[in-house]
Amino acid sequence: MQQEAPGGSEALEVWIDQDLCTGDGICAQYAPEVFELDIDGLAYVKSADDELLQAPGATTPVPLTLLRDVADSAKECPGDCIHVRRVSDRVEVYGPDAE
């Protein structure tokens, strides 16, 4: 299943830079299926089977049904630490490095 991205229809993935995470939790409020705050107070992405991915730079696919929530999370994040990019060429489409 393809997921629509700005400028085309592509699969997307999301990751969080924990070094910039403020622990505000806005992402977990917008998309609790994708983001979760851990005991350390920082946000992490979750795998499709709900496993917390704590490795630095860990990515998870963005479900098409949650694209708007994930994009809003990236836009509203006070730490500018949420990065959404196309899987095919790793170009950021939402987040601080989006073109």
Image: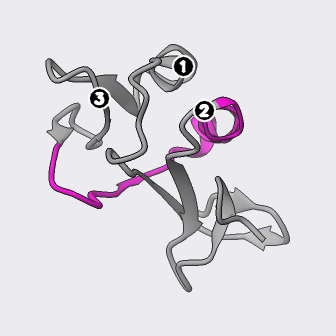
Question: Considering depth in this image, is 71 or 78 the residue closer to the camera?
Answer: 78
Secondary structure category for the residue under label 2: loop
Looking at marks 2 and 3 on the same chain, the residue that comes earlier in the sequence is marked by 3
* Residue bounds of the magenta highlight: 54-76
Q: Which residue is mark 2?
A: 77
Tell me the CA gap for discs 1 and 3: 11 Å
Considering every residue shown, the one lying at the far top of the view is 29
Image position, residue 66 (x, y; %): 59, 34
Residue 65 in magenta stretch: yes
Q: Which mark is residue 26?
A: 1
Secondary structure category for the residue under label 3: loop
Q: Which residue is mark 3?
A: 42
Tell me the CA gap for discs 1 and 2: 7 Å
Mark 1 touches mark 2? (CB < 8 Å): yes
Image position, residue 75 (x, y; %): 71, 38
Mark 3 surroundings within 10 Å by alpha-carbon count, few (fewer than 14), some (14 through 19), many (20 or more): some
Instruction: Please name the amino acid that badge 1 sits on.
Output: Ile
Residue 60 in magenta stretch: yes
Vertical comparison of 46 with 59: above or below: above
